[in-house]
Image: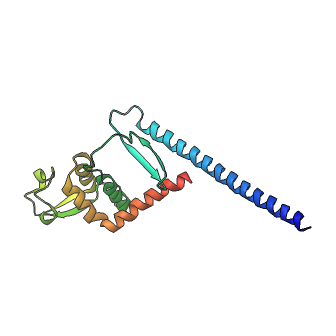
Amino acid sequence: MKRYSYNIAYELSFIIILVITASCLAHKNNCSRKLQALQNELNELVKGKEAKIGIAVIINDEDTIGINQCDTFPMLSVYKFPIALSLREYAILNGYNLNSKCRVTSSDLLYDTYSPMLEKYSAIDTVMISIRELLAYSLQQSDNNASDIILKVSLYEFTLLNFVMVVIFSVISRLY
């Protein structure tokens, strides 16, 4: 009798291990399909663009997908994009639009950095600048002062980090 119950326990253990293994393989296969779907979306986004675009998405320190991820790209002003997105989010949450004005003083401006907006605003003590203009300086002309002002106006670094984390988690949650 004991031999018979031992065989059942052994067989049940084997079946449980088999089910867990099959479940893990199915999950991995499902994840692979989702990663491939994301890769296809990225390929479509950059297809036909006259630009050198690099995108890398690393998930759980294991899976990496991307566009031109083996190429090297300088960091330069990559951080300005999420800062601009954070201003957009701040504006929406607080009922502002692109024409809303931000108060900028001469103490907000650094004169020893790259800043095309200094050509227009260096001699002014206080000025009201629209969100649209700040975004244009920051994103189109890579203006360091505009980017710093956006941080001061909208968020501070802690809130920016929270915003970036929300975006990252929303992308990851689409995958799983």
Q: Nearer the viewer, residue 155 or 63?
A: 63
Q: Residue 172 placed where, x, y %?
A: 50, 55
Is residue 166 something one can see in this rendering?
Answer: yes
Q: Quadrant of the N terminus?
A: bottom right
Q: Quadrant of the C terminus?
A: bottom right
> Left or right of 137: which side holds 37?
right
In which quadrant of the rendered view does residue 68 lie?
top left
Q: Most extreme residue toward the left, as rendered?
A: 123
* Circle count: 0
> Left or right of 8: which side holds 37?
left
Q: Give me the residue at 39% from left, 62% from top.
A: 163
Q: Residue 44 placed where, x, y %?
A: 46, 36
> Left or right of 15: which side holds 135?
left
Q: Residue 109 placed where, x, y %?
A: 14, 61
Q: Give me the residue at 65% from left, 50% from top.
A: 25
Q: Give me the residue at 28% from left, 59% from top.
A: 100
Does residue 9 lie above or below 47 as drawn? below
Is residue 93 something one can see in this rendering?
Answer: no
In which quadrant of the rendered view does residue 8 lie?
bottom right
> Left or right of 12: which side holds 152?
left
